[in-house]
Amino acid sequence: MPAVLEIEGLRKTYKSRRRGTRNALDGFDMRVEAGQVHGFLGPNGSGKTTTLRTLLGLIRPDGGRMSILGHQVPEALPVVAGQVGAIVESPQFFPHFTARDTLSLLASAGDVPANRVDEVLELVGLRDRAGERVKTYSLGMKQRLAVASALLKNPKLLILDEPANGLDPGGIREMRTLTRNLAESGMTVVLSSHILGEIQLICDSVTIISLGRRVAFGPVDEVLAQHSSGAVRVRLEAVSDLPAAADALTRSGIRVTGQDDHLMLAGVDKPAAVTRILAEQGLYVSELSPVTVDLESVFLELTATAPVPGQHRQVDQSLKVGGPEQSGATGGGWGA
Amino acid sequence: MSLYRTELRRLTKRRFTRYMTLLGLLVLVAVVLGTFFTNQKLDADAVAGAERQADRQYQEQVRWSEQERAACEAAKAAGTPNDGRYPDDCSMITAPPREAIEASWFLPSTFNFRETFPETLIPFAAILALVGFVIGASFVGAEWSSGGMMNLLLWRPKRLTVLLTKLAALLTGMLAVTLPAAVAWFAGFWLVATFRGTTEKVTSGVWQSVTLTGLRAVVLVLVVTTVGFALASLGRHTAMALGGVVAVAVVGQFGLGILLEMANVRFPQVWLLPTYVLAWMQKKVTLQDWESCNATVFGECKPETFDITWQQSSVLLVVGVAAVLGAALWAMRRRDIS
C-alpha cells in the first residue's frame, strides 16, 4: 500500500543556555499508509505535537526527511497543503468571530467553495450554533469547530491532534463514527490521542513515540501480539488438583504462578500443549484462556510510564529507545 | 488574490477595527465642528465692534495715565519718598498713541484657509496615524495570540506571502479610510473658511502646496500603520507594539530629551522623533540655539539655527520602516511557530 505520510530520522533540537541541549525529536520514524486510521501515541512531552508541527511546516527540523502524499516537505507544502487538513493541539480561533465567519474566512483563503462551510458545520453538529461567537463555545464545541476547519478542504490526509479533548461521551462516539466514515470514504486519518481505548477501537495501525523516538509501530493487532507475554489462565475441575498440575507444568518448562482457584502460566507458545500435559497426568481442564493485553498496558510498558505507588513521575521520565532503559528528568523530550 | 480579499474581509469584520476607525473619524469631526463654532466671519459690524473696543481701550489708557500722573505730582508735592513707583518727571506718564492699540486685537477668531489650513493637517495625520498604529498592531497581534495565524499557515504555508498579504490588506483598508477622510477634511475646512472665515488668496499654488502636505499626511499614516503591524508581528502580540511605543516615548524621547538638556547639547531636538515628523509635515523645521548669540550688522543678537528638512525626515522614515518590517519578515521566516 502506498505511504501517504513518511518520516525518516526526524530530528529537532532545542538549545537553551540555562537548560542545555534537548532533543525533542531524536531520529524519529513514522509511516502511514493510504486509507488507514493511524494512531499516534506518546506520553506528554514525548514529541507528538512537535512531530505534527514540523510535518506541517510550523517548526523547522534539524534533520531527517518527511514526505506527504509523495512530496517532500516542507519544500512542497504549498503544493500539498490543499490536501492536508489538520488540527494541532488545542483548538485556537479568534474569539470574536462566529463559527461560520471563522470557517468562511478559511474557506475563502483556501479557495474552497462557500457551500462546503455548511456541509462541515452539519457534519460536526454545529449547524444550529454556527452564528454564535466562538468565545461563547465550550471546549468541546471549539473542538468540533477545529475538526470542521480541518475537514473544510475535504483532504486526502487528515491530522487530528487530540480530537476528543473536551468532548462529552456522545461526542466521542460521534467523533469515532465520523473518523471511521472518513476512512471508509478513502481519507487517511492520523489521530493523536491519550484515550487509548478509542485508539484501539478506531485505528488500523499505531506509532508509539517516547522521548522523540519511535518505540513501536505497525498494525494494532501486531503491536498487541508482539507485547503479549503469552500468558494463559488455567482452571481445573477440582481446585485440589492445582498443586499437581503446577508441578507437571513446571517440569515441562512452563513458568507457573499459583492463585487461589487457578494457575497463571507464562511463556506458553501453544495452549494445546497445556491440555496435553495435564491430560497425561489425568488432570482435566475446565478453562484455558489466553490473557490478552490492551493498548493501554502496552503503551505503559513501552513508554515506561506506568504509575508506581509512592512515586511522582516527571513528564520527561519515560523510556528512551537505544539508551539507558529508564531515562531521568535530564533526558530529551523538552519542548514537545 | 483570494487571500488578499479574505484578509480585507477579516480586517473589516473585526469590531476593534470598526470601533477604532469610528472613534478616529469622530475625533476628526469634532475638530472640524470645534473650529467651526469657535470662529466667526468678519463682516463690517465685527470690524466696527472691534474699532469701538479699541477706542474704549484707548480711553481707559488715557484715563489711567492721567490718574497716575496726578498721583505722581501729588506725591512729589507732598515730598513722599519716591520708592520707584513714579518717574522723576511726572509728565513722562502718558497714554500710548491711539494707533498703538490695534482694532485687530479685538476681532473675533476667524478661519483663514490659506494661513491656517496647512496646520490642521498635522492633527489630521496624527489622529489617523494613531488609529492606523493600533489597528495594525491589533490586526496581526490578535492573529498571533489567538492562534489564527497558525491556522492560516496550515492553509497557506508561505509565511512571507501571508504576512505581506495581511499588510497589503491593512494598508488598503487604511488608505480607504484616510483618502476619503482627507477629502472630507479639505471640504470641511473649506466650508469652515467659507462660513466662519475667509478663502481669500487661495491660489493654485496654495492648493498645490496643501495637496502635497495632505499626501505627506497620508504617507505618514501608512508608515505608522506599517510600524505598528511590524512591531506586533515581531513580538507576536498586540502588546508588543503598544509596549514598544511606550518604551520609545518614555525612554527614547522624554528620557533622552532630559539627558540631552543636561548635557547642554546644542540642538537636542535633532535627536527626537517628533521633530522629524513635524519636518515631514511642514517641509522644514528650523531649530534655534538660544544659548548662542551671533551679532548682526544691526547689533541685534540672533540665535544659531539648524534646519531639518522633509527630505531628511523621509530618509529616517524609510530606514525606520525598512528596519522594523525587515525584522518582522526575518522573524516570520526563521522562527518556529509553537
Image: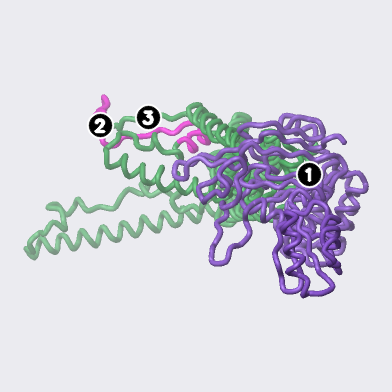
Above or below residue A317? Residue B267 is above
Q: Which residue is at the front of the view, B171 or B181?
A: B171
Residue A218: which disc?
1
Residue B293: which disc?
2
The residue that mark 3 highlights is: B306
Q: Quick one: SS at disc 2?
A: strand
**Three-letter code for the amino acid on which mark 1 is drawn:** Gly
- Distance of mark 1 from mark 3, alpha carbons? 78 Å
The answer as to whether the residues below labels 1 and 2 share one chain is no
Q: Residues within 10 Å of mark 2 (few under 14, many from 20)?
A: few
Label 3 marks a residue whose chain is B
Q: Which residue is at the front of the view, B192 or A76?
A: A76
Residue shown at 67% from the left, 54% from the top: A301
Above or below residue B165? Residue B46 is below
The boundaries of the magenta stretch are: B276-301
- Distance of mark 1 from mark 2, alpha carbons? 89 Å
- Distance of mark 3 from mark 2, alpha carbons? 14 Å
**Three-letter code for the amino acid on which mark 3 is drawn:** Phe
Q: Is residue B286 left or right of residue A79?
A: left
Q: Quick one: SS at disc 1?
A: strand
Which percent across, then down, holds residue B335? 59, 38
Q: Is residue A107 visible?
A: yes
Q: Which chain is purple?
A: A
Which percent across, then down, holds residue A210? 64, 47
- The quarter in which the N terminus of chain A is drawn is top right
Residue shown at 57% from the left, 32% from the top: B326
The answer as to whether the residues below labels 1 and 3 share one chain is no
